[in-house]
Image (cartoon, helix red, strand yellow):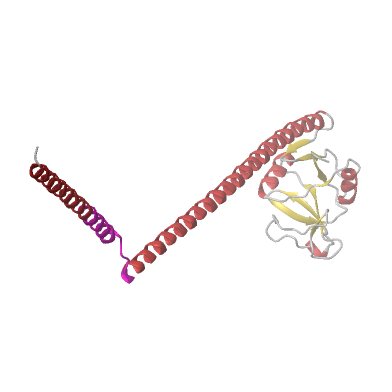
Amino acid sequence: MNKGSIMDSEDRIERTVDIYISAEAVRDMKHKKNTEDFNTTTTTTTTTRKPQHTGSDGVKIRSSRAAVVCLVLVCVLLLTAVIVLCVTFTQERNQLLTNNMNLTEERDQLKSEKNYHRKFSAGVCQFFSLNGGWKCHQSSLYLISSEKKSWTESRRYCTDRRADLIIINNTEEQDFVKNISGGDLVWIGLTDRDVEGRWKWVDGSDVTFRFWQPGEPNSFQGKEEDCAVNRSPGWADYPCDYSSKWICEKSIFK
C-alpha cells in the first residue's frame, strides 16, 4: 500500500471518531437537559402542591379547634350531670327502700303487739270474770256492786281492789254502763266536793264528755249534792252520803 492511501485511511478514521464523539456529546447534553427539565418540573409540581395557608384559613382552623373544645366540654358536663343524677337517684331509691323496710318492721311489730294485747286482754278478762265477776269493755275491767254504800265507802271498796269509781269518757262507755247497771242508780267517779260547781273525775281530770240529765246538776232543795250518780237516762248530783250501788273500773294492763 502506498503512502497516499495510508494517509487517506487515517483521515477517514479520525473523521469517524470525531463524528462518534460528537454524537455521544449530543446524547449526553440531551440527557442532561431532560434530567434538568424533570427536576425542574418535579420541583415546580412540589412547590405548587405545597399548601399555602392564608389568614382566613388560620381563622377557620382556630374556629374549628374552639368548636371541638366546646363540644368536648359539653360532653363532659353532660356526663357529669348524668353521673350526679344516677348517684342521687340511687341514694333516694336506697332511702326509700330503707324507709319501706322500717315501715314494714313497724307494721309487723304493731301487728304482733296488737295480737299480744288482744290475747293478753282475753286472758285477763277470762280470769277476772271467773274470779270476782268483773266485766270487760275495750281495755278496762268493770265491777258492779250488789250492795249499797255511800259515795266515799263505794270508792274505798274500789281502791281496795286496785280500781276506782268509773270514769265515763264517751257515749259508748255510757251505753255500756246503762247495760250492766240495768237502769239502776249507781255511783260514778264524779264530784265537786273540792270546789263547788267544778266537777272533776276521781283521777283529777276535767269533765270533757257530759251526760247530765236535763236540769242537772242542781243541788235539789238546797242540799249539798256533791257526788254524781248514773241513772236512766243520764247523770244527776246526789248527796255523797246517799246509799247506792256503784261501778268500779280498772285497766286491764295494771
Q: Is residue 191 left or right of residue 235?
A: right
Magenta segment: does it hold 50?
Answer: yes
Q: Which residues are magenta?
A: 34-56
- Which quarter of the image is occupied by the N terminus? top left
- Closer to the camera, 232 or 161? 161
Q: Quadrant of residue 225?
A: bottom right
- Residue shown at 83% from the left, 57% from the top: 204
- With respect to residue 43, does 140 lie above or below? above
Residue located at (72% from left, 44% from top): 177
Find the residue positioned furthest to the front.
Answer: 2
Q: Looking at the figure, which quarter contains the C terminus?
A: top right
Expressed as whole percent of the image width and height from the top left, the position of residue 238 reads: 81, 56
Q: Is 25 inside the magenta-drawn segment?
A: no
Residue 67 position in % (x across, y down): 39, 62
Say if 219 sits above or below 230 in the image: below
- Whether residue 64 sits left or right of residue 92 in the image: it is left
Residue extending farthest to the bottom is 55
> Horizontal placement of 38 versus 199: left or right?
left
Count how many numbered circles sit on residues in the image: 0
- Identify the residue shown where x is 72% and y is 37%: 113
Pinpoint residue 10: horizontal percent, then vertical percent: 13, 45
In this picture, is 56 found above or below 82?
below
Q: Position of residue 115 (x, y in %)?
A: 70, 33
What type of secondary structure mainly makes up the magenta span? helix
Which of 20/15 is in front? Answer: 15
Q: Nearer the viewer, residue 98 or 240?
A: 98
**Residue 108, located in which quarter of the rendered image?**
top right
Front in this rendered view, residue 37 or 188: 37
